[in-house]
Image: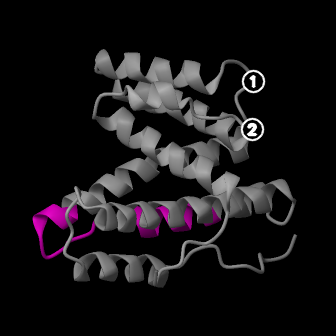
Amino acid sequence: MSEPEETFYTADRWQNWLDRVAEEELDPENEDSARLLLNLQDDTAIAVAKIVTAYDEDRLSEEQAVAELGEIREIVLAEVEMDSEEKTMLIDGVQTSLVCVFYAAEEYIVGGAVEEGTVEEYVEAAIAAEQEEDVDAALGYLVQAGTLIIDGGELPMDVVEGIEYGLVSEWVNGLDSLQSAFADPEVVEEDE
């Protein structure tokens, strides 16, 4: 396999999103503000989905796909300082949601989809693990759920809506973006 032809994501792209967040008057209760943050998250999830798809279609080797994911992860999860503490926290929330997306994609590329269990069972196990304060186990379960989502499984919305706010709800939010990215891998326009 040769060098990949396509660029999946760039630091400039992420910076453009951060610039938009910096310029906007953000209010998490406001639909436009929430949409901007969701678009930023979805845009990253779409890039991750494109890497996984390129790997599945043999346009990227396992090594290339993992390297591409690593590059995006470095860009997106780098510490961000905004002029307002609230904006910094909102971006941090998006970054937290995406952690599970990166791990799930990497796990899928390296090991494929988990062979037993359902998305719902893994999400429920993650919720239980978080209640037991076992955050690592919770993330592990959601990574497995993520491999199933990449493989065509679906997040059960009735379970998702009942999750109390915390790390699991943030990570599931990321998996929801990943599911959307595979269902409709259209690029989110930065200048909407």
In the rendered view, does 187 fall on the left or right side of 10? Answer: right
What residue span does the magenta drawing correspond to?
A: 68-88
- Badge 1: residue crowd in 10 Å (few <14, some 14–19, many ≥20): few
Separation of marks 1 and 2 at Cα, in angstroms: 9 Å
x 84%, y 66%: residue: 59
Residue 47 shows in this picture: yes
In the rendering, at what x and y percent does residue 53 appear? 76, 58
Left or right of 66 in this view: 122: left
Q: Are marks 1 and 2 in contact (CB under 8 Å)?
A: yes
Which label belongs to residue 115?
1
Tally of marks: 2
Q: Which residue is mark 2?
A: 112
| Secondary structure state at the residue bearing disc 2 | loop
Who is closer to the viewer here, 169 or 137? 169
Could you tell me the amino acid type at mark 2? Answer: Gly
Vertical arrangement, residue 77 with respect to residue 6, above or below: above
Q: Residue at x 71, y 47 (%)?
A: 109
Is residue 76 part of the magenta span, yes or no? Answer: yes
The reply to whether the magenta stretch includes residue 40 is no
Residue 80, image x, y percentages: 26, 69
Please give the label number shown on residue 45. none
Classify 122 as above or below 63. above
* Scheme of image coloration: one colour
Who's the residue at 49% across and 26% down the image? 158
Instruction: Left or right? Give the position of 134 relative to 160.
Output: left
